[in-house]
Amino acid sequence: MPETNARPRLLLLDGHSLAYRAFFALPVENFSTTTGQHTNAVYGFTSMLINVLRDEQPTHVAVAFDVSRQTFRMQEYSEYKAKRNKTPGEFSSQLPLIEEVLDALHIPFLKKEGFEADDIIATLVTQALAEPDMEVLILTGDRDSLQLVTDRSTVLYPMRGVSDLARMTPEAVETKYGVPPHQYPELAAIVGETSDNLPGVPGVGQGFAAKWLKTYGDLDGVIDHADKITGKKGESLREHLGDVMRNRRLNALVRDLDLELHPRDLAL
């Protein structure tokens, strides 16, 4: 368990991502009230929250939720997340209960019409890192948040179920993906993101994408030198540059939302 100290530590949770993960990790038929209300997502989310509060001992905390799938990203690309299955009613009915749990624990939660929970988290992280001494922990199952990792902000990424968390520091991100955190969205723009229905460059995997980014400095460099990349992979890249640039626009998190709460307002 981390030592308690006076340094402010902000814990941000991607509520929708974590609740959805809990819903599928725990058998829905085993968790319900006498009235038939399913509670597996409530139980799993609350367990995860209690565990991380105990283990990380944050001084500040908030939960971000999606409002709907109708976001500015879908307005630009109608196929964004289009292949995801319809949200089960057994899950949707549990979200208000999770909000009730948060209210009972006096933990604030935020939503923003037209944006995703990731964007709320990105904005709060940006504001927190502008403070001289605040560190940030982001509990999420969405890899897009890896772009927020710095020496003062760490992603806690669920690996199995709702209990095993990987600590994604800058070193861990680079070890796993071959690029530093700020370049993760550039890597994802090239290889695509299945969960978001963003197709990448066919035939190009993580290793080649990371190599290109290292060779040419960044995604702009890769695009500028696309005509110099030989072989079938280079040909495939040139044929799909439009997809790559679209992916990069869509996976960039918004860091300047107008929110009703600031990190300083989130003290436990």
Image (tube, rainbow, N blue to C red):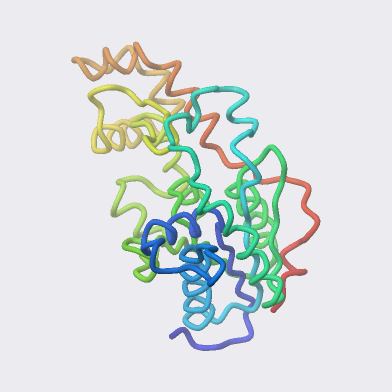
Residue 134 sits in quarter:
bottom right
Q: The C terminus is located in which quarter?
A: bottom right
In this view, the residue in front, 238 or 55, is: 55
Asked if residue 73 is positioned above or below residue 223 in the image, the reply reads: below
Q: Residue furthest front?
A: 35
Q: The N terminus is located in which quarter?
A: bottom left
In this view, the residue in front, 24 or 261, is: 24
Asked if residue 242 is positioned above or below residue 212 in the image, the reply reads: above
Give residue 94's position: percent from left, percent from top.
57, 59
Give residue 81's position: percent from left, percent from top.
48, 33
Q: Residue furthest right?
A: 260
Left or right of 204 on screen, residue 27: right
Residue positioned 53% across, 71% down in the render:
33
Q: Residue furthest bottom?
A: 4
Give residue 53's position: percent from left, percent from top.
54, 78
Residue positioned 73% across, 45% down in the render:
257
Give residue 247's position: percent from left, percent from top.
47, 28
Left or right of 200 on screen, residue 33: right
Asked if residue 129 is positioned above or below residue 199 in the image, the reply reads: below
Left or right of 248 on screen, residue 6: right
Q: Residue furthest left?
A: 231
Residue positioned 35% across, 17% down in the render:
226
Residue positioned 62% across, 47% down in the render:
66
